[in-house]
Amino acid sequence: MPQDAYTLKYVARDLSALLPGTKVTKITQPDRDTLHLYIYPLFGGFKLEICIFPKFRRISLTKRDSRSLDTPSSFLMLIRKHLQGAKILACGQIPNERIMYFDFESVSEFSIRCFRLYAEIMGKSSNIILTEDNKILGCFKPGYAGEGVRNTLTGADYTLPVSQHKVLPDDLEGIRKALSESGPDALHECITGIAHVTAEDIISTYGEGVTAEQVYEYLNSDDICPCVILEGSKVTDFCARSSSPLAVPRESILQAQTEFYDSATAEATLQSRKAGYSASLNAALKKAEKKIATERQRILSCDNMERDRLYGELITANIYRIRPGDELLVADNYYSPSMEQCSIPLDKQLTPSQNAQKYYKRYNKQKRTVEVSQKLLDEALAREDYLLSVQTGIQRAQDTEDLAEIAAEMRESGLLKDTAVKKSKKKAVSKPYRMYTCKGYELLAGRNNLSNDALVHALSGDDIWLHTKEGHSCHVGIICSGNADAVPEDVILVGAQICAFYSDLAGKGKVEVSYTRRRSVRKPKGAAPGFVTYTDYKSMLVSPDPHTELKHE
C-alpha cells in the first residue's frame, strides 16, 4: 500500500480527468474515518471515497454500498450544508505532498461560494479539512497544541504541514548527492514523497547500483504500469509500477487501488464483525458454562439422597426397637443381598417417627432439587450446544452477507440487541444457501442455523442430507429428484467434503460425515435453530474441501 506522494500523483491525475464539471448529489459517512461523495455523472455506480483511517488511508473510487452512521458527525453536517449539490471545479495534488485538494462551487439563490476540501493522507496525521478563502470552516480532527504547531481549529488559516527538508523528486543534483552520501537503501529517507515500498521497487528494478538518473526517471516518468499484487486469488497490494512477479496489470491506478481497498476493507470489516459477534457470543457461552457448573454442583450435593431414603425406611421398619434417648440404630439392610448391618444416627430429642420423617424430608428435598436441576442442566447444555453451533457459523463465515444472516439469528435469540441495527424500510433479500453443481446434481449448503432449518424443509423425502457425525457443521443437501440410489458415490463425497469444511472440525484432519435420506431427518418440537435428529444413516471419512470451483450463485 504505497500511499506516498509518488503514488498519489497518479491517483490525482486520474481523478482530475474524471471529476471536474461533475456534481455532488449525496454525502454519507459509513464510519467515523470515511466520507463517501456521490458524484453525478460518474458512470458505473462509483463514489468518491476519502478515508483517513491510518491502515487504509486513501482517496479512491468505490462501488461498495454505504449507509451513513445513525448519528451524523458535526463535520458531516457541515460539508453537507456547503458541498451537497455543489459543482466540482478542479482537483489535484499539492506538489510532492500526500495531500489532494478538491475545489467546489456552491450556487444558492443569493450567492455563489467557492470551497476547497483538503484530503491529507498522512498516516496517523491524516485529516479532511474544509476551507473557504483559505480559512478553515471545519475538519475531521481539529487541534492546536501551542505556538509553532500547526493549527487546524475553525477560523484559522490553512497551512501545509511542516516541511521535512528532503530532496525533491525532480532535483537531479539533489538525488545524486543523496545517493553518494547515504546509498540506495536510504532513498525513502532522503527523497520527498516516496515510501519505503517505492524505494525498494526502485532498487529491485535497477539493482543495487541504481544511478541518480534512473531514480529521477522512475519518479518523474509518466510511463507507469498500474497493477495489483495477487497471491493466489487474494489481492495483497497495488502499485503504480512494480517489478514483482506477482504483479497483474490494470487499466489505471484508480482501478488497481479500488480493487485492493475494496478487498482489504471487506476483509477488515468481516474480521471486525466476527470479533464483535464473537464477543457477544462468548459472554453468552460463559453464562451457559457457569449455569452448567452450578447445576452439576447442585446435583452432586444431593448424592446422599438415596442413603437418606434408606435410613428413613429402615427406621420405620425397626421403629419398635428404638428406645427414648437412643442416638444410634444398628439395623440389617434388607435392600442389600448380603444383608450387612447399617448404623443410622438418631436425634435423641426426636421420637422414632420424627427421626424417620427427618430423613424422608431430606430425601424429598434432594429429590426435588435433582429433578429441577437436571431439567435446568439439560436446558443449559442444549443452550451451550446451540451457542457453539452459532460460533461455528461465525468462524466459517466467508463474507459479510453470511454474518448479516447470523446476526439476524442472534437478535432473534436475544444474543444481540435489536437497537444495534437501524430498521430499514426494505428487507434485504439474502441468498439462503451456498449452491454447487457436481456432475449435474445440485448441492445446497446452509449458511447458518436458520438457513440449515430452511434447507431441511426445502429438501424432498428422497433427497440426500449430510452432517458431520460429531460437532457442529452446516447442513448439506443433494437434490436427486427422487432417485437417491442413482447418486454417484463421488457426488456424495463432494457433499461430505463441503460439510466438513464448514464445520468446527475443519483443520483437524479427516472428519466423519453422516448422510441419509431427508425422510430420516426430524426436527424435534421446540428445538433450537439448526438442531435435528436423524436415523438410518451411513458415514464416510473425508478431508474438508470448500470446492469453490463447483460453487455458483
Image (tube, helix red, strand yellow):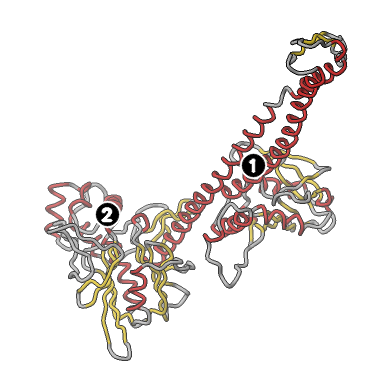
Residue at figure coordinates x 35%, y 58% from the top left:
53
Residue 311, relative to residue 208: is it above or below? above
Between disc 2 and disc 1, the foreground one is 1
Circle 2 packing at 10 Å, graded few (<14), some (14-19), many (20+), is some
- Say which of 310 and 128 sits in front: 310
Residue at figure coordinates x 62%, y 43% from the top left:
388
Residue 233 screen position, x and y as percent: 50, 54
Going by the picture, which residue comes out furthest to the bottom? 109
Residue 370 screen position, x and y as percent: 73, 32
Q: Check disc 2 and report its element: helix, strand or loop.
A: loop
Residue 433 screen position, x and y as percent: 66, 58
Judged left or right of residue 500, residue 145 is left
Q: Check disc 1 and report its element: helix, strand or loop.
A: helix
User: Which label number is shown at residue 8?
Assistant: none
Residue located beneath label 2 in the image: 195
Q: Is residue 252 visible?
A: no
Residue 127 screen position, x and y as percent: 29, 63
Residue located beneath label 1 in the image: 384
Residue at figure coordinates x 82%, y 59% from the top left:
481
- Say which of 42 and 417 sits in front: 417
Marks 2/1: CA–CA distance: 50 Å
Judged left or right of residue 363, residue 271 is left
Circle 1 packing at 10 Å, graded few (<14), some (14-19), many (20+), is many
- Name the quadrant of the N terminus: bottom left
Q: Amino acid at mark 1?
A: Glu
Task: Tell me which corner region of the image, top left, top right, bottom left or bottom right, holds residue 455.
Answer: bottom right
Residue at figure coordinates x 78%, y 51% from the top left:
525
Task: Tell me which corner region of the image, top left, top right, bottom left or bottom right, holds residue 403.
Answer: bottom right
